[in-house]
């Protein structure tokens, strides 16, 4: 029996340890019926720091689904992973050890990464376990472990064999800080302060053309935010419809300070509304420059290197960082008389999302996965999934429609999975590893051939790039399903085919373009199947003012601080408080509400056990049930159906609030108060049956307190119980018990609701009149159909004489007690007539016709006045009303 106050500090850690130690949520080793499996493809968090509120919220939402589906008949697969390869783990290691990856041989640095990540993963695991998340910890993976490396390299080989991958020397997005190529999805827009520079370019004309046109100038102006790219200028562009500057087309211009000549060309991509409407093309400043370079076959002049420093093309500025070079070049332009104006602006800059550094566009040799040819197909497969919420598909759609690049998957880093590729030292032929040999590292492993199949040369160069981390984490459904190459059958197989396709992909809306899109692409290309039935997209946690949490602003809420003050179950209650997909503020009042509900559930459980000591009382004969018992069980049937639908539709907020209201009001305030006055088998059976069901309904949300109560009140009695409700699904753990199905109890729902309303209003009457609850009431008249519930009303409220009028025609009338004028409207409109209107109202000299008031010869409309009304009973006794129920109390006491 639960005793004393509930102590979450003792209860919650004990159950967290026990769930892990006893492998309560382990996926079975024996074969599983695919029709009963519910598989979740959980997001592997980046190993780069400690738990934050986004983790707490996201993991808890996933757990709601896992616990509900596990109880609702699904053999649930709920794994956990760590994304510990790539830039994030590399930067973490560099920061922790104060080293640079470039200073180490790759394997040596990767070993250091493993050590640092292992420490973080151990702590992170403890933190996640402290949230009570029902993960199967036996199915934990790291994206750098050998098994996952094999899957990742198999994916590369398969896509290469399909012709979906290619290596090309071409402009690529480059991060000078991280010194690696990145993909479009790893960039984000950042508003930054900058300057527009109006620079004078001289026109270079051939002397043979004759005398200059008097209407044409000798110079023109270009406005740019990046004067440091002047040494990379290869052309100037004018829009063909630009009448003012059209005369320049066909001429040449001299680049200030650097002196090289460039052609002036017409092109429709020029934005005539920006700056002077004349644009310089540099290789490369942005996407437009790349397109111009390719379409017009321009020269290649690279002025900025991989680390963001100026190259020899920049002449005297060589070796300067691009930021320093910008200021120096601007000063020199000013000295040379070529700087016409410099004005401050704020504009959008493309930055690397990992470090916030402005990206460059460099010509490098990289590996790509072809995607632009299939964007329509990728939109179609996105539509095959169910989206929770549905509105999130729009984000996916916008991302796919806005793609400008194929997926660049090679990285110039040390932490990552190697490309299984060598190149012929003579002819550059690509040599791909055999599937049976994977995983391999070309820096230390030999190629699968002794001589180049193209030219016969016997020397090879290993690929020293590594795969983008998203190229691996996009394979999580295949990793979890055990996707592999069967050498004997010469086909791809899965160790757990029953898991695929996965039932659910939960994740944040910020990585739809990262993780979700790339997972769809990869898995679809490998299996010709969409990997998920449903994706559940959660929002972000904001501060109490609905602002994004930021360490620099100082508004970050740390989970450790929250969990020191509040029970884990209170944070779970909080996490269920908003619609999935919406960003929502962190508010302590929601945590306090969760604490109150936990205490209410605990105290109500103690009362249930005191009123019904047997955990599984035998079901009484049908005639022994009161109508109120049937009504409660029938109402609970409806609530079970409603909660089941809401949880199935991931509407956790509606499920939480509705269940809390039903439990607190209908069960505790109404039925439990009535049952306290009874001592019979029907009440005991109803109390216990309802209570067990409430514990199950609350279990996905309040995981710890429900487990503690279930263990104390039911689990130990399962084996010895003489009678157990077949629909109850008793178990050692409430989280392994069957989700409740409706019992199919028939009852008069309206009459039961009316009867409990009568009890409630009579209880309030006694409280307001300072009468004890067991004080007898002489006579009560009820104007509502509560037939069949009379004994419950008289018994619990001690009514000597109860009269029921089922037709509800109470001798009560509604009378008008006053008229209020809206003077803000009436005053300006009627002026001097207002006094007459007030006088007529004081004498009740008016007439109300629907929403019109006729008074003092004028007609006021509904928004110009309001009517005060009251209900009056002119007989003996006191009028009490609640909803549509009228109660008259006559009491001489």
Image (spheres, rainbow, N blue to C red):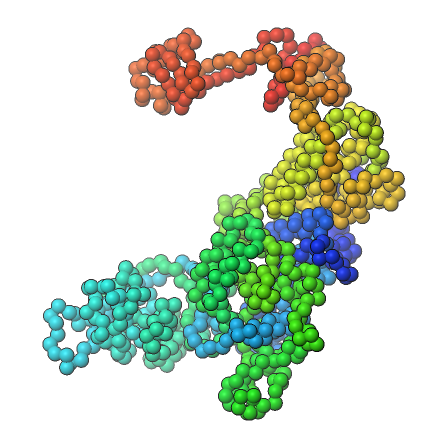
Q: Quadrant of residue 193?
A: bottom left
Q: Quadrant of residue 266?
A: bottom left
Q: Is residue 223 visible?
A: yes
| Identity of the residue drawn at 68% across and 24% down | 751
Vertical side of 101 occupied by 584: above or below: above
Relative side of 276 to 326, left or right: left
Quarter in which the C terminus is drawn: top right
Q: Position of residue 361 (x, y in %)?
A: 41, 71
Tell me how many marks there are. 0
Relative side of 319 to 76, left or right: left
Q: Nearer the viewer, residue 741 or 763?
A: 741
Quarter in which the N terminus is drawn: top right
Q: Nearer the viewer, residue 750 or 854?
A: 750
Q: Is residue 671 visible?
A: no
Q: Position of residue 163 (x, y in %)?
A: 53, 74
Relative side of 727 to 102, left or right: right
| Identity of the residue drawn at 25% across and 66% down | 240
Vertical side of 417 occupied by 679: above or below: above
Q: Position of residue 577 (x, y in %)?
A: 59, 43
| Identity of the residue drawn at 68% across and 52% down | 66
């Amino acid at each position: 029996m639960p005793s004393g106050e509930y102590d979450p500090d003792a209860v919650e850690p004990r159950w967290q340890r026990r769930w892990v130690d006893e492998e309560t949520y382990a996926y079975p080793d024996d074969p599983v019926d695919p029709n009963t499996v519910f598989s979740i493809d959980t997001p592997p968090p980046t190993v780069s720091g400690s738990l934050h509120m986004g983790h707490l919220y996201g993991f808890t939402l996933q757990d709601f689904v896992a616990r509900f589906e596990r109880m609702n008949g699904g053999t649930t697969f709920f794994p956990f992973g760590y994304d510990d390869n790539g830039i994030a783990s590399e930067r973490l290691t560099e920061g922790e050890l104060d080293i640079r990856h470039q200073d180490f041989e790759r394997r040596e640095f990767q070993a250091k990464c493993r050590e640092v990540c292992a420490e973080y993963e151990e702590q992170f695991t403890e933190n996640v376990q402290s949230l009570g998340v029902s993960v199967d910890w036996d199915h934990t993976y790291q994206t750098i472990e050998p098994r996952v490396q094999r899957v990742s390299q198999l994916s590369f080989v398969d896509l290469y064999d399909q012709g979906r991958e290619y290596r090309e020397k071409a402009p690529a997005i480059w991060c000078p800080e991280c010194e690696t190529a990145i993909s479009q999805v790893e960039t984000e827009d950042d508003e930054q302060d900058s300057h527009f520079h109006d620079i004078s370019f001289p026109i270079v004309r051939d002397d043979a053309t004759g005398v200059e046109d008097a209407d044409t100038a000798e110079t023109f102006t270009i406005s740019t935010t990046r004067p440091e790219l002047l040494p990379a200028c290869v052309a100037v562009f004018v829009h063909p419809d630009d009448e003012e500057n059209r005369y320049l087309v066909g001429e040449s211009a001299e680049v200030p300070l650097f002196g090289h000549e460039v052609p002036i060309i017409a092109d429709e991509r020029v934005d005539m509304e920006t700056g002077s409407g004349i644009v310089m093309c540099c290789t490369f400043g942005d996407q437009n420059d790349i397109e111009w370079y390719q379409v017009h076959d321009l020269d290649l002049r690279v002025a900025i290197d991989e680390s963001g420093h100026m190259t020899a093309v920049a002449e005297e500025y060589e070796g300067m960082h691009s930021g320093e070079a910008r200021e120096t070049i601007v000063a020199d332009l000013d000295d040379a008389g070529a700087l016409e104006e410099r004005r401050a602006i704020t504009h959008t800059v493309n930055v690397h999302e990992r470090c916030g550094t402005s990206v460059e566009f460099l010509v490098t040799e990289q590996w790509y996965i072809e995607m632009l040819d299939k964007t329509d197909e990728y939109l179609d497969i996105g539509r095959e999934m169910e989206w929770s919420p549905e509105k999130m598909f729009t984000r996916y759609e916008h991302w796919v429609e806005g793609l400008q690049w194929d997926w660049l998957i090679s990285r110039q880093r040390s932490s990552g999975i190697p490309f299984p590729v060598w190149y012929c030292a003579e002819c550059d032929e690509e040599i791909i590893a055999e599937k049976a040999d994977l995983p391999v590292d070309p820096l230390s492993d030999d190629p699968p051939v002794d001589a180049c199949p193209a030219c016969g040369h016997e020397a090879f160069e290993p690929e020293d790039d590594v795969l983008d981390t998203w190229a691996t984490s996009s394979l999580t459904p295949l990793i979890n399903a055990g996707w592999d190459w069967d050498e004997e059958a010469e086909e791809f197989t899965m160790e757990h085919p029953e898991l695929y396709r996965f039932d659910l992909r939960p994740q944040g809306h910020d990585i739809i373009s990262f993780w979700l899109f790339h997972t769809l692409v990869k898995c679809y290309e490998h299996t010709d199947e969409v990997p998920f039935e449903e994706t559940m997209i959660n929002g972000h946690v904001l501060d109490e003012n609905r602002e994004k949490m930021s360490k620099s602003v100082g508004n970050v809420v740390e989970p450790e601080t929250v969990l020191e003050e509040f029970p884990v179950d209170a944070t779970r209650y909080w996490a269920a408080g908003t619609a999935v997909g919406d960003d929502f503020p962190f508010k302590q009042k929601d945590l306090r509400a969760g604490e109150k509900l936990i205490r209410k559930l605990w105290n109500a459980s103690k009362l249930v056990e005191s009123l019904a000591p047997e955990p599984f009382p035998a079901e009484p004969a049908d005639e022994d049930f009161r109508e109120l018992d049937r009504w409660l069980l029938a109402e609970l049937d409806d609530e079970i159906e409603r909660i089941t639908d809401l949880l199935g539709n991931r509407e956790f907020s509606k499920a939480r609030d509705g269940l809390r209201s039903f439990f607190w009001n209908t069960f505790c305030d109404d039925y439990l108060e009535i049952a306290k006055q009874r001592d019979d088998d029907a009440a005991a059976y109803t109390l216990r049956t309802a209570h067990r069901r409430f514990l199950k309904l609350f279990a996905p949300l309040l995981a710890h307190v429900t487990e503690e109560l279930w263990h104390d009140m039911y689990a130990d009695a399962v084996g010895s119980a003489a009678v157990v409700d077949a629909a109850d699904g008793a178990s050692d753990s409430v989280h392994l018990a069957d989700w409740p199905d409706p019992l199919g109890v028939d009852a008069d729902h309206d009459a039961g609701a009316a009867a409990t309303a009568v009890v409630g209003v009579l209880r309030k009457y006694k409280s307001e009149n300072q009468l004890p609850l067991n004080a007898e009431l002489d006579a009560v008249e009820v104007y509502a159909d509560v037939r069949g519930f009379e004994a419950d009303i008289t018994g619990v409220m001690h009514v000597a004489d109860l009269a029921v009028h089922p037709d509800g025609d109470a001798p009560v009338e509604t009378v008008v007690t006053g008229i209020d004028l809206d003077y803000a409207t009436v005053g300006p409109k009627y002026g001097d007539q207002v006094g007459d209107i007030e006088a007529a109202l004081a004498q009740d000299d008016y007439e109300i016709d629907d929403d019109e008031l006729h008074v003092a010869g004028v007609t006021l409309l509904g928004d110009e006045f309001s009517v005060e009304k009251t209900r009056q009973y002119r007989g003996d006794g006191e009028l009490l009303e609640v909803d549509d129920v009228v109660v008259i109390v006559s009491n001489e006491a």
